[in-house]
Structures are given as structure tokens and as C-alpha cells.
Amino acid sequence: MSLILGLIEMLLLGAWFVLRWHRLQQALQWWYRQHVLRLFDEAEAARNGVLQDAFTLRRTVELSLIQHQALKKADEEKLLMTLGELHDSLKRFSDFLSPPYLEDSFPMSIEHLLRSHQHPDVVLDFSLPKKWQPNSYEQSRVVWIAIDELLRIAIAPSVESISACLTQRTTTHEFMIQIFYSNDNCQTFQTQLTELSHLRRAAQFLTAGTCTYHFDNATLKWLLQWS
């Protein structure tokens, strides 16, 4: 009898490990898929935006030189507007390839990331340390990507305010964020829970840390800890 119970326990334990591995595999596949889709979106934006704008600028200047004519005021204004859009597109693409301040100051990089996701009417409150003992760039980038993905998943029109806190202790680091939604529209966020689950598992595995989240009373609380 004890032998049968032992075999049953081993089978249950094996099934548990298989299930955990399957969920982790799904989470890592999701992480990779999100990265690939982001690269695709940025490449499409560059092709349809930056490259087209650059071509338009080049043709406008070439025609003015060929015709030996000064640009009309309307053309000048259009040219300046196109240059502004070109600058914004290049800055966004550059920020995606290499997040600002990440190599020099992780807290400043997180502040920039939070502000980049902030909608005009959303109240943003954060507590970030002025001093930070640097991690490896690779680890900082993984944490940055995890926070970026969280914000992309969780930020919605129903968000009213965001509160974030970054702390560094002797052996651990912690990033905690709370996102408050309006009671009327918070249910629209429920569809994102599967992605949050994938993000939690992937972040835990890739940072060798712990990640938890809780959604209650129109508030999402997300906590990531790593060493």
C-alpha cells in the first residue's frame, strides 16, 4: 500500500513539474513574441514614417535647388513640421534600442520610462532613490523591459493615477507599482490578466527573483524583487 502511495506521490510531483515547466515555456515564448512584435512595429514605423519623411525632405530640397527658387512660407512650415516629426520618430526608435540613462542611472531610466507611458490626465507619483549601486547592464535591461511590458499591458484610458516606488537594499532590489482605475471602466482590464501571468513567470525566471501582482478594488499592485 505504501509503495502505491509513493508511486502516486511521484506521479503527482512529476505532473506538477511538467505543468510548471509548460507554464514557464509559455511565458518565455510570450516574452520573446512581444519582443519580436515590438521590433516589427518599430521597423514598420521607420519604413512608413522616418524613411518617407526623409524622402519627402530630400525631394523638396532637390526641387528648390533645381528650380533655383526659395521655398514658399507654406513649404517652409511643412518642412519644419516634417523635421519635427522626423526627430520625434528617431528619438522614439533610439529610446527603444537603448533606453535613456539605463547605463548611467537606473532610477533616472525608470523615471523616464514612467513619464513616457503617462497619459496627460493621469496623476503620476513616484519615489526613486538618488543613489543606486549599479547592476549589470544586462540585468538592468531585463528589469526595464519587464516594467515597460507591464505598463504597456496595464495602462488604459480608465487609469486615474499611478504610484511607483523603487528601492535598493543591501542584497535585494524592489520595484513596486500601483495603478488605480476608475470603478466604471476597470473591468476592461480583466482581459489582460493572462498577459500579466506570462509576464510574472518570465520576469521571475529571467531576473532570478520574485514577481507578484494583485488586482482588487480597481487597483493593480505589481511587485518585482531581484538580487
Image (tube, rainbow, N blue to C red):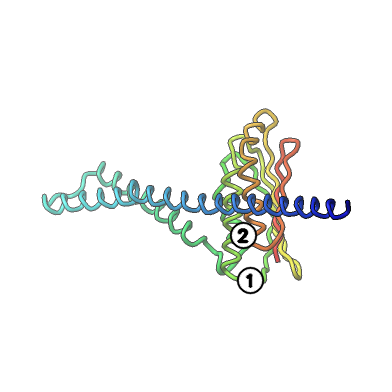
Return the residue at label 1: 134
Q: Nearer the viewer, residue 64 or 42?
A: 42
Residues at badges 2 and 1 in contact (C-beta under 8 Å)? Answer: no
- Residue type at tag 2: Val
Relative vertical location of residue 102 with respect to residue 180 in this rendering, above or below: below
Q: Residue furthest top?
A: 184
Q: Residue at x 57, y 56 (%)?
A: 145
Relative vertical location of residue 78 with respect to residue 173 in this rendering, above or below: above
Give percent across and percent down for residue 35: 50, 53
Q: Residue at x 29, y 44 (%)?
A: 78
Q: Nearer the viewer, mark 2 or mark 1?
A: 2
Give percent across and percent down for residue 202: 62, 55
The answer to whether residue 35 is left or right of residue 197 is left
Q: For the residue carrying disc 1, how many other residues have a C-alpha within 10 Å: few (<14), some (14-19), or many (20+)? A: few
Give percent across and percent down for residue 56: 25, 48
Q: For the residue carrying disc 2, how many other residues have a C-alpha within 10 Å: few (<14), some (14-19), or many (20+)? A: many
Q: Residue at x 75, y 38 (%)?
A: 216
- Residue type at tag 1: Pro
Gap in Å between the C-alphas at discs 2 and 1?
Answer: 13 Å
Report which quarter residue 7 is drawn in. Answer: bottom right
Q: Nearer the viewer, residue 21 or 189?
A: 21
Report which quarter residue 173 is drawn in. Answer: bottom right
The image shows a total of numbered marks equal to 2
Relative vertical location of residue 109 with respect to residue 73 in this rendering, above or below: below
Which label number is shown at residue 143?
Answer: 2
Query: Label 2's element?
Result: helix
Relative vertical location of residue 21 with respect to residue 74 in this rendering, above or below: below
Name the image quarter holding the C terminus.
bottom right
Q: Residue at x 60, y 58 (%)?
A: 110
